[in-house]
Image (tube, rainbow, N blue to C red):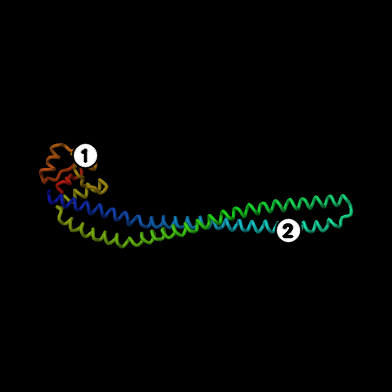
């Protein structure tokens, strides 16, 4: 294989790897933000469950207070019942007592409903608390790992940068300029593997004579369709 072409293949491999590392580095802040957002969402959801449980507890205390007030009222009515002097007053007092007893039953039924909901909520909160602990630990580990990966990625980029400069120095200036021109127009990919008589990038069939020349000569050849520099992996 043409040594210049071999160097270009090495150069493109380095640049594509560098581009991937740059992308990983640029993605890290967003990844960390997404992880923090998820952690905040989980925490907020748990806090909301706890707040609902507290609201139910307050509601239960309010209902119990109302029952206590009704019980006091009922006790007073029963005491007053003993002092009435007429049937009409007696009947009216009985009606008030029955009404108070009905209100007490209704409030006690509401208390039971609240207690049942509180019990279900308590079980849900306990399960959610354990899940939150596990998921939060995992998210914090991921956040820490993402941050810790930055120095290693930067070190790899620096090493690839030095390798890139060394390889560029070996490539003819005009050929390197042509490589740069193609790469700029083709999203960083200036070289394309020729395989099974096809350009691996644009998937257009290579002319038989050109494909034969690729296999037999050291000439620098370009795809008729996408203008990328062609090479064969078999010989590289």
> Residue 75: percent from the left, percent from the top?
78, 58
Between the C-alphas of marks 1 and 2, the distance is 90 Å
Mark earlier in primary sequence (1, 2):
2
The residue beneath circle 1 is 225
Point 36% across, 57% down: residue: 28
Question: Residue 14's image quarter?
Answer: bottom left
Name the side, left or right, on which 99 lies relative to 64: right
**Closest to the observer, 167 or 95:** 95
Name the side, left or right, on which 33 lies relative to 196: right
**Closest to the observer, 56 or 144:** 56
Farthest residue in the left direction? 217
> Residue 5: percent from the left, percent from the top?
15, 49
Discs 1/2, front: 2
Image disc number at residue 66: none
Q: Which type of secondary structure does the marked residue at label 2 adopt? A: helix
Count all numbered tags in the image, as a single digit: 2
The residue beneath circle 2 is 69
Q: Which type of secondary structure does the marked residue at label 1 adopt? A: loop
Farthest residue in the right direction? 85
Point 71% across, 52% down: residue: 105
Name the side, left or right, on which 186 lies relative to 80: left
- Dot 1: within a 10 Å radius of its alpha carbon, few (fewer than 14), some, or many (20 or more) residues? few
**Closest to the observer, 63 or 168:** 63
Is 67 above or below relative to 207?
below
> Residue 215: percent from the left, percent from the top?
12, 43
Is 71 above or below relative to 206?
below
Point 20% across, 42% down: residue: 227
- Dot 2: within a 10 Å radius of its alpha carbon, few (fewer than 14), some, or many (20 or more) residues? few
Name the side, left or right, on which 112 lies relative to 185: right
> Residue 189: percent from the left, percent from the top?
24, 47
**Closest to the observer, 184 or 104:** 104
């Amino acid at each position: 294989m043409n040594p210049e072409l071999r160097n270009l293949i090495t150069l493109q491999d380095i640049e594509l790897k560098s581009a991937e590392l740059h992308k990983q580095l640029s993605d890290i802040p967003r990844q960390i933000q997404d992880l923090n957002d998820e952690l905040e969402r989980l925490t907020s959801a748990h806090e909301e469950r706890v707040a609902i449980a507290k609201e139910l507890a307050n509601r239960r205390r309010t209902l119990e207070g109302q029952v206590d007030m009704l019980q006091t009222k009922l006790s007073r009515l029963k005491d007053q019942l003993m002092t009435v002097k007429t049937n009409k007053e007696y009947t009216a007092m009985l009606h008030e007592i029955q009404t108070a007893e009905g209100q007490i039953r209704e409030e006690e039924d509401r208390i039971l409903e609240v207690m049942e909901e509180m019990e279900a909520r308590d079980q849900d909160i306990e399960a959610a608390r354990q899940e939150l602990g596990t998921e939060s630990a995992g998210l914090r580990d991921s956040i820490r790992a993402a941050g810790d990966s930055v120095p290693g990625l930067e070190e790899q980029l620096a090493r690839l940068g030095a390798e890139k400069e060394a390889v560029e120095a070996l490539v003819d200036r005009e050929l390197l300029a042509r490589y740069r021109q193609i790469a700029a127009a083709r999203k960083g990919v200036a070289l394309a593997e020729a395989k099974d008589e096809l350009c691996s990038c644009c998937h257009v069939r290579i002319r038989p004579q050109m494909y034969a020349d690729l296999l037999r000569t050291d000439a620098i050849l370009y795809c008729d369709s996408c203008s990328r520099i062609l090479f064969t992996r078999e010989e590289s």
